Image (tube, helix red, strand yellow):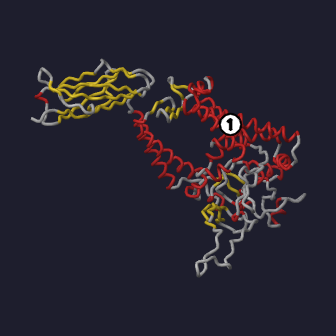
Amino acid sequence: MRGTFLPRPFGKGEGRGEGFVKPFFILNTDLKSPGKNGAADDKSAVQPVNWSDFRDHLATADRDGRRQWIYPRKVSGEFFRLRTWFSWLLLLVMFAGPFITIHGNPLLLLNIVERKFVVLGQIFWPQDMILFAVAVLIFAVSILVFTTAFGRLWCGWACPQTVMMEMVFRKIEYLIEGDAHEQRELNHAPWNAKKLFQKISKHGIFFALSFLIGNVLLSYLIGWQSLNQIVTDPPAQHVTGLTFMIAFSLLFYGIFARFREQACTFICPYGRLQSLLLDENSIVVAYDYKRGEKRGPLRREQKFGERRYAGLGDCVACNNCVTVCPTGIDIRNGTQMECIHCTACMDACDAVMTKVGNPLGLIRYASLNGIERGERLRVTPRLVAYSVVLFVLAAVLGLMLFTRADAEATVLRAPGSMFQQMPDGHYSNLYTVRVVNKTARDLPVELRLENPAGTLQVMGGKLLVPAQKLLENSVLIELEPAALKSGTTPLVIGVYVDGKKLQTLKTAFIGPRL
């Protein structure tokens, strides 16, 4: 049994390419249905596959289920130029990120081993887990809002997989092996010195880039200073680090050299989410079937009016939109799970429309209602509801960040300790205090017993918590007999830094039963 995300025509026409497509999930079975005796019924053969219908098979698989390698043609155009400039900006931020510091802290650090996280120069610790939970909710809701409004715009313009594949690795491949037809001929040609040189050169550069990307990713996890130690110190001193470095390099090489578009179509769940999030007003890369159908090749000296008179639309059936697609689909079949909204088909179609003298935008950013009814884009109640939830969560997160203390303390009674009666008649309890410094500077922390009246003594003198460290110390609290209640007495302790109160701690004082 195999589940396949396939599109279904919605609107006018049921033929191939004759309708805007709404995605849904079809469950196909390759098993024979059981007969009366529980055995397979010989009359129920495997469901036949219509290989001329895009619904019945994957664009990247042949009749035997083997992968069909995709050779997308070079693309150029206005959208491709905009994506290129935007991709260079993203790549600059990605490679420079580990070396950018804000107030002495890195721009981004996700050190899972030390449980230390830095975002935009702000340090977060496990004690800030509530902030992480709210941030995850904001991320999830932002996906709902963004996809409902703009479809998979993220995938085509900002996803690291697309940016690296299309703007780095694919361009290197074009430079070494040529355009799509040249790559296809090279792969089917017998091995010779030229082919060997091209393949070794390409894959050597691919692995070097993968090694570089792996090191950059590792620097986001452990910091570039630690990465520099792994690189410069003898390998025996950093076996674990070198293992991760090689593993990351091999992983990225496998993705960009072999796995490619399958990371988007098979692994990434975002494409499958769009079937739940898109509606008739979502902006997607869409083929205007009303204007384009019926398709037909353009004959010499055939004018626009003559095509309309013959029942033909603007689509000249050049298939350029298919040959440039990095996932191998035909956008004229409608919105499909494999479409990453990279706009390559839009540029290819606009180039053809310019040559034949037809208006641009046969394939364009549009909504279902925009194609079928000519409606302008509008804000839907669902989008408003998502946006309100996102705004509320963002406000909560902003308030939590604004009121977040520089230090956080916890106080617990020392395990196994009992109350002691001092020579002057006072009673004492021993406590353990832990203080986390969330800043990049040393913090002088003061503890004050605020209720009831008594004395609080920090063992070893004042608390000076080093930057980005956890300090643990012992605290002795003494109370007069008059301040005690029978059994346990509530205590209130104030935590101060530079005279400013950051936190109030509550604990219990154990004393004799009166």
Residue 263 vertical placement versus 37 (above, below): above
Farthest bottom residue in view: 36
Residue on which disc 1 sits: 210
Residue under the image location 75 percent in, 55 percent down: 68
Give the quadrant of the N terminus.
bottom right
Give the quadrant of the C terminus.
top left
Nearest the viewer among 408 and 374 is: 408
Looking at the image, can residue 281 be seen?
no
In this image, 427 relative to 311: left or right? left
The crowd level at tag 1 (other Cα within 10 Å; few <14, some 14-19, many 20+) is many
Q: Position of residue 170 (x, y in %)?
A: 74, 42
- Callout 1 amino acid: Ser
Nearest the viewer among 79 and 4 is: 4
Quadrant for residue 405, please give it: top left
Residue 323 vertical placement versus 20 (above, below): above
Farthest right residue in view: 300
Quadrant for residue 228, please give it: top right
Q: Position of residue 445 (x, y in %)?
A: 33, 23
Looking at the image, can residue 456 be seen?
yes
Farthest front residue in view: 236
Nearest the viewer among 123 and 281 is: 123
Residue 21 vertical placement versus 133 (above, below): below
Farthest left residue in view: 514
Q: How many marks?
A: 1
Nearest the viewer among 236 and 135 is: 236
| Local SS, label 1 | helix
Q: Position of residue 452 (x, y in %)?
A: 18, 29
Q: Position of residue 272 (x, y in %)?
A: 59, 55
Residue under the image location 84 percent in, 63 percent down: 306
In this image, 445 relative to 456: left or right? right
Quadrant for residue 375, please give it: bottom right
